[in-house]
Amino acid sequence: MRSRFSRLAGVAVTALALLAAAVPSLAWAAGTSDRSSKPTIVLVHGAWADSSSWMPVIDRLRRDGYPVRAIANPLQGLTSDTAYVTSYLSTIAGPKVLVGHSYGGAVITNAATAVPDVKSLVYIAGFIPAAGETVGELAARSTPPLPLISTQVPDGTEVSLDPAQFRSAFAADLDATVAADLAVIQRPANTKAVTDASVTEGFRTIPSWDLVTRQDHAISPDLQRFMATRAHARVTEVDASHAVMLSRPGDVTKIIEQAAR
């Protein structure tokens, strides 16, 4: 009898040990499930920037458990850029939140309805063109005009911001050295980015959020408010320059996560 109880006790101890070993795995699986249930945040930069401009925001989103993708916007024209971004969006399974800064806002507006599961749109100091409208037409309503330098290239004309005025026009609330570095590495945009007409109004069927930058010298705050109101976006305002994702990444992350929830 004693031998039988010993065997039963041994079986119980073994079962408890296996259960204890499984608990961390179950906890990890639960955490993974929670993480995977969150939508993928897709970040699209605008002119005179690149995907690295999102790094402070990416760090915060990943820390909060969101999967993130930052797509390199070619800046070669609204029609071709929309097709390019759409091709990458089609590879991302599950719900998505599209975030566009500046000209990137026009791109996500046109790409949003071309793929399934776009949950919301977030405009960060972004252009929100209506169908038939060009970014150039909207930009003309923003004063004063930007200090642009044109360069002829094989596929037309590209424009960049005058490095000497980059900080005042784009990043007035950033350290002077950081702004100077950004001026050096800025990516020019083909003029077709502002002359191609917008085709699709993603904001008509997809909930939208908008972060308006009150100290913006690239897109005037009044123009941002006009576009946000027209798009029926949920608006937050912040005292920041056009480079808000670098100067106020916490505010940018906050509005993205509001849209994601």
Image (cartoon, rainbow, N blue to C red):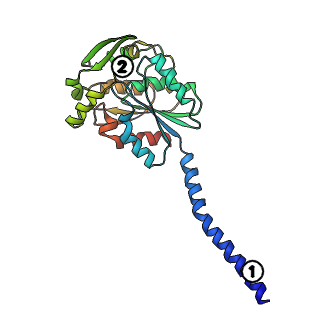
Q: Is residue 109 above or below residue 199?
A: below
The answer to whether residue 196 is visible is: yes
Q: Position of residue 43 (x, y in %)?
A: 44, 34
Q: Residue furthest bottom?
A: 2
Name the residue that disc number 2 marks: 189
Q: Residue furthest right?
A: 1
Residue 76: image x %, image y %? 42, 18
Residue 106 lies in quadrant: top left
- Residue, x 43% and y 28% (percent of image)? 72
Which residue appears at 19% of the width and 24% of the height?
Answer: 164
Q: Is residue 216 visible?
A: no
Position of 101 compared to 178: left or right? right
139 or 79: nearer the eye?
79
* N-terminal label among 2 and 1: 1
> Eyeballing the image, is 134 above or below 242?
above
* Mark 1, residue position: 8
Residue 49, numbered circle: none
Mark 1: few, some, or many residues within 10 Å (few <14, many ≥20)?
A: few
Q: Nearer the viewer, residue 162 or 142?
A: 162
Q: Amino acid at mark 2?
A: Ala
Amino acid type for the residue under numbered disc 1: Leu
Location of residue 259 in the rendering, given as x and y in whole percent from the top left corner: 47, 39
Mark 2 closeness class: few <14, some 14–19, many ≥20 residues within 10 Å:
many
Q: Position of residue 251 (x, y in %)?
A: 35, 41
Q: Residue at x 21, y 35 (%)?
A: 177
Q: Secondary structure at mark 2?
A: strand
